[in-house]
Amino acid sequence: MSVILEARDLQKSFGAVTAAADINVSVESDTVVGLIGSNGAGKTTFLNIVTGYLKPTSGSIYFDGRDITSLGPRQITRLGICRSFQIPQLFDTLSVRDNLLVGVGIVASAGGSWRHAANTDSEPAKAVETMLARFDLQSYRDMSAGTLPEGIRKLLDIAMAMVAQPRILLLDEPTSGVSAEEKFALMDLVMEAVRNQKVTVLFVEHDMEIINRYTHRVLAFSEGRIIADDEPEVALNDPEVRKYIIGETLHVKRRDSHATA
Amino acid sequence: MRIDRTIIVLTAAMAALLAFTPFLPNWAMFLFTVSLCYGVVVLGMMLLVRTGLVSFGHGLYYCLGAYAAGTLEPLFGITELAVMIGSAVAVTAIVSAILALLLRKYRDIFFAMLSLAFSMILYGLLVKTSSLGSTDGFNVTVKTLFGLHIADTAYERYLIFALTVLICWTCAVLMHFYLKSHRGRLAEAIRDNELRVEYMGASVANTIHLHYVMSAVLAGLGGALMAVSVGHIDPEMAYWTTSGEFVFITILSGTGSVLAPFLGATIFESIRSFAYEYSPNTWQMALGITMLMVIMFLPGGLWSLFKRASRRVA
């Protein structure tokens, strides 16, 4: 498998605080990678650096062999790296349909410079319907985004990130704020929609059950460093990871796994 | 293809104005002229408000458009109406394109106050320019329209009015289609969430820049049409109270449709004319009460009345 995303010697400090140090990661295409770590460990900082929202103090990021360290979020989105947010970032006064339509419109009007925005549906409205169906949002079509339940807002936020048909999708805590009963249904829906399109996924998550069930590989962050980088079974049983992130008492049971499918 | 209802209403209104105005008394024709000129300015303000920006300084472009049209005669001896209008468009486009480089970095009250400051700079400059009549302003002369001599003819006023109607109609139709386009839809998206717009791959700064220039050109057109219709301009056009009136009408109208600004401007002008006629000392109170009523009972502007009505029918 080819390497799609590579971070080399990433370093980021905010004054005296080191948010990222010695980050060396390469992610193969068509895999699902989980990012775990306690609050302030540097997971979101890593996402922010990858998407160009933050510039690293030193080091560089390569996407498909191309150095993207100096690009901003807009250019990086156009190259094919999209993200969702821990707190959904939506157009609150617009309907669900119009939220997606804005996204489809941006893709369609950008024309040829969008290498990966292969909009298979010629008509924008059709493309919106496809997204609504894929994320099971049809019944919310005409509701304004500001009035949606939190789980649906999360889903729409992820659907918005998928509108541009990215090659890499970064999800920042997709199940935070979603009830325990709903989180697996939500992740099943998202993973199915995303994996159908062979998108490489990196997601930040605190829920080890989710990590265990959906990822091929885990990156464990602690104080800006990666302390473990391995398959979920190995990484989640790593003594360092247990000590700093998971705690000793949790026993991860392997449920029917999507990751190996 | 289904024909758009907004376009039908616009076209019908244009036809009615063109057909019936010659038979209306002078004061009514004047009222419609002023309403159209204000309406086209507010059309631009509406685009900015949709983008989440309120400018308290669009008097700048209103005045600049008027002076760009009016000064052609004293400076170059040009009295051709089409050239005067073109000059207003060109000057406001250039000035706004430059100022937008700075203004597009600001939001909310900072954007409002900075745009107000620029308009007051123009006011200050014009007041100090004695060759252009200082606070008195000067008279604007139109002699020809597309080479046809119209000065002092029986149809001069009607032709200028007809041109005003046509320009307003064109601007409203273009704006209507723009708002429905992919880029036009970005306006409300930017108002709601700039971060998401950037993360979808569109440029917030460029879109705001474009919308600012578009609204400035519309304000310039309004100013130039006012100048040639009334035949007199003065620096008051750039004063902050003029900009305030534009904001007033924008709130009164609502931003739901391109018809709203023209409706709002007509109602505003009617209230002002009649209130001034019947109670010269308290006419501002009539406007104030109207504003209070709109804010309290129709926060979406007058246009929300039509929206409510059409929802009931549907």
Image (tube, coloured by chain):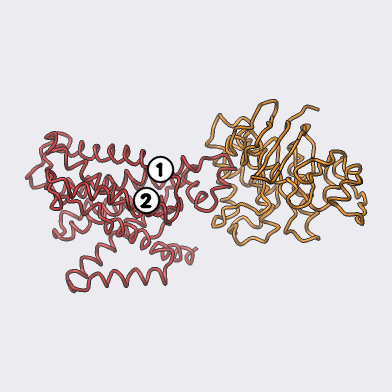
Distance (Cα) linking label 1 and label 2: 9 Å
Chain A rendering hue: orange
The amino acid sitting under disc 2 is Leu
Residue labelled with disc 1 = B102
Q: Residue at x 35, y 48 (%)?
A: B172
Of mark 1 and mark 2, the one earlier in the sequence is 1
Residue B113 occupies quadrant: bottom left
Residue labelled with disc 2 = B114
Chain B rendering hue: red
Q: Say whether residue A5 is visible.
A: no
- Image x and y of residue B255, in percent: 41, 56
- Image x and y of residue A121, in percent: 62, 38
Query: Which chain letter matches label 1?
Result: B
The amino acid sitting under disc 1 is Leu
Q: In the shown orientation, is residue A6 left or right of residue A117?
A: right
**Quick check: marks 1 and 2 in contact, CB under 8 Å?**
yes
Under tag 1, what secondary structure? helix
Q: Residue at x 63, y 35 (%)?
A: A120
Q: Badge 2: how crowded within 10 Å, few (<14), some, or many (20+)?
A: some
Q: Say whether residue B60 is visible.
A: yes
How many numbered marks does the figure carry? 2
Q: Residue at x 47, y 48 (%)?
A: B187
Residue B132 occupies quadrant: top left
Outermost residue, front side: A16
Let me know if marks 1 and 2 both belong to one chain: yes
Query: Which chain letter matches label 2?
Result: B
